[in-house]
Image: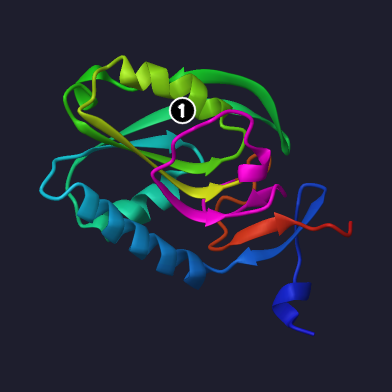
């Protein structure tokens, strides 16, 4: 039996198993960076990073794109524990000068229900960007409750809860280099 498949970590009371390796993530982020650079050739993008989960992905994606641009941060929340609450709260909003008339690259860690983007995108659009390109590392289409246009997806994954590479479970697990999935057999 493959030892990577049987490996486990515990965050708080929950066990997690390996799901995506650091190498798999790095390879895909490089591809996404090239795709993004191709789409926005010669542009001066404004990168807006959804905190807290997307910070590691954003840093790697921006470097992989080779593009220089302003970087801003937005913070929303919708999770309590391992479940989305279905209600989005804005804690840090984007600044108008980072958006108005600019090609905006919105970087998200995960799109599952779509509710965060449904709530946030109209606020972003109200600031009159030239364009908005939504890039997410992970997408859970089976969990999606509302329609959201995602321009670039790193990985399509099942609805199981995941941590690592910036994503957390109640503040733990962001430091993990790979993505770990909630173990089914606990």
Q: Residues within 10 Å of mark 1 (few under 14, many from 20)?
A: some
Q: Position of residue 39 (x, y in %)?
A: 23, 49
Instruction: Report the residue at 20% width, 21% height from top.
Output: 100
Q: Is residue 159 highlighted in magenta?
A: yes
Q: Quadrant of the N terminus?
A: bottom right
Instruction: Report the residue at 70% width, 76% height from top.
Output: 4
In the picture of the structure, the residue carrying the numbered disc 1 is: 75
Residue 32 position (above or below residue 150): below
State how the image is colored: rainbow
Residue range highlighted in magenta: 141-167
Question: In the orientation shown, which residue stands out farthest toward the right?
Answer: 186
Depth check: 96 or 176 in front?
Answer: 96
Residue 150 visible somewhere in the drawing: yes
Depth check: 118 or 9 in front?
Answer: 118
Question: In the orientation shown, which residue stands out farthest toward the top?
Answer: 126
**Residue 30 relative to residue 40: left or right:** right
**Residue 73 relative to residue 181: left or right:** left
Q: Position of residue 126 (x, y in %)?
A: 31, 14
Question: In the orientation shown, which residue stands out farthest toward the left?
Answer: 42
Q: Is residue 161 highlighted in magenta?
A: yes
Secondary element under disc 1, as helix, strand or loop, is strand
Q: Position of residue 37 (x, y in %)?
A: 22, 54
**Residue 26 relative to residue 41: left or right:** right
Residue 93 visible somewhere in the drawing: no
Residue 21 position (above or below residue 139): below
Q: How many marks?
A: 1
Indicate the quadrant where residue 85 lies: top right
Instruction: Report the residue at 74% width, 83% height from top.
Output: 2
Q: Position of residue 182 (x, y in %)?
A: 75, 54
**Main secondary structure of the magenta stretch:** loop
Residue 75 position (above or below residue 162): above
């Amino acid at each position: 039996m493959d030892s990577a498949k049987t490996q486990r970590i515990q965050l708080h009371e929950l066990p997690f198993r390996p799901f995506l390796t650091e190498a798999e993530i790095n390879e895909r982020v490089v591809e996404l960076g090239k795709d993004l650079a191709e789409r926005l050739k010669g542009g001066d993008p404004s990168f807006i990073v959804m905190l807290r989960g997307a910070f590691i992905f954003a840093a790697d994606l921006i470097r992989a794109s080779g593009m220089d641009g302003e970087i801003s941060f937005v913070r929303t929340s919708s999770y309590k524990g391992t479940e989305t609450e279905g209600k989005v709260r804005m804690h840090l909003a984007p600044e108008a000068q980072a958006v108005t008339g600019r090609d905006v690259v919105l970087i998200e860690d995960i799109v599952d229900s779509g509710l965060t983007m449904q709530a946030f995108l109209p606020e972003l659009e109200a600031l009159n960007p030239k364009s908005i390109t939504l890039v997410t590392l992970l997408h859970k289409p089976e969990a999606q409750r509302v329609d959201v246009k995602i321009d670039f997806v790193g990985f399509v994954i099942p609805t199981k809860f995941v941590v690592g590479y910036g994503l957390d479970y109640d503040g733990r697990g962001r430091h993990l280099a790979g993505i770990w999935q909630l173990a089914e057999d606990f």
